[in-house]
Image (cartoon, rainbow, N blue to C red):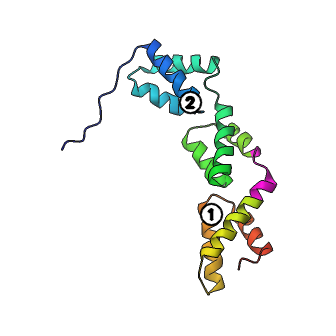
């Protein structure tokens, strides 16, 4: 069995634009995701940048809208913290200015309530007699979910989780 990478499909610009429009219309995409997809279609660098420009002009591609949607979606659906969301946006090559703007969209009260909820659920699953180890496991869990260290300690202090 030989597992080779499939040969790139070489498309003309018009077909690639139509496919890219469909790709962007399906869900919000970052410029880098679209750029990678266009390169997968076998287009050259100048053609890719031209198509990206067309997608932006026709409002199929909007980096600010993507960053906001990504941040709110990951927070609401996966209950990620700001740190993990920021790292995800950086991986998608979103600018720092847009990342800060997107993270400001997260409501502080909802953010703290979500952190408290996930720590409470996790505390119910931890069967550890030693309070130091229990606290450490909860802190590690909060950090893994992308929440800030100081906020995790604030929630642990104010609740009866330990």
Residue 40, percent from left and from top: 40, 28
In this orientation, does residue 76 appear?
Answer: yes
Mark number for residue 66?
none
Residue shown at the point (76%, 69%) measured from the top left: 155
Toward which corner of the image does residue 105 lie, by quadrant? top right
Judged from the image, the secondary structure of the residue bearing numbered disc 1 is: helix
Counting residues from the N terminus, which is met first, the one under dot 1 or under dot 2?
2
In the picture, residue 147 is in which quadrant?
A: bottom right
Question: In the rendered view, would you say 71 is above or below 139?
Answer: above
| 110 falls in the magenta region | yes
Rendering quarter of residue 144: bottom right
The one of 83 and 13 positioned closer to us in this rendering: 13
87 in relation to 66, above or below? below
Q: Which mark is residue 26?
A: 2
Q: Which residues are magenta?
A: 104-112
Q: Position of residue 43 (x, y in %)?
A: 41, 20
Indicate whether 2 appears above or below 161.
above
| Label 2 CA crowd tier, 10 Å (few <14, some 14–19, many 20+) | few
Whether pointer 1 and pointer 2 mark residues with C-beta atoms closer than 8 Å, the reply is no
Q: Main secondary structure of the magenta part?
A: helix
Left or right: residue 19 compared with residue 80:
left
Tell whether 72 sits left or right of 8.
Answer: right
Which mark is drawn over residue 143? 1
Q: Nearer the viewer, residue 43 or 74?
A: 74
Alpha carbon of mark 1 to alpha carbon of mark 2: how far? 32 Å
Which-is-in-front pick, marks 1 and 2?
2
């Amino acid at each position: 069995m030989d597992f080779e990478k499939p040969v790139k499909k070489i498309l003309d610009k018009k077909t690639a634009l139509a496919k890219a429009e469909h790709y962007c219309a399906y869900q919000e995409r970052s410029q880098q995701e679209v750029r990678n997809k266009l390169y997968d279609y076998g287009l050259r660098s100048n053609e890719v940048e031209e198509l990206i420009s067309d997608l932006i002009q026709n409002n199929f591609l909007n980096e600010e809208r993507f960053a906001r949607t990504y941040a709110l979606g990951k927070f609401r659906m996966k209950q990620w913290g700001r740190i993990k969301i920021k790292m995800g946006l950086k991986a998608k090559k979103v600018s720092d200015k847009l990342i800060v703007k997107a993270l400001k969209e997260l409501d502080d009260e909802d953010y703290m309530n979500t952190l408290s909820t996930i720590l409470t659920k996790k505390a119910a699953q931890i069967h550890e007699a030693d309070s130091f180890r229990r606290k450490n496991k909860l802190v590690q869990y909060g950090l893994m979910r992308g929440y800030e260290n100081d906020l995790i300690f604030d929630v642990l202090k104010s609740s009866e989780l330990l």
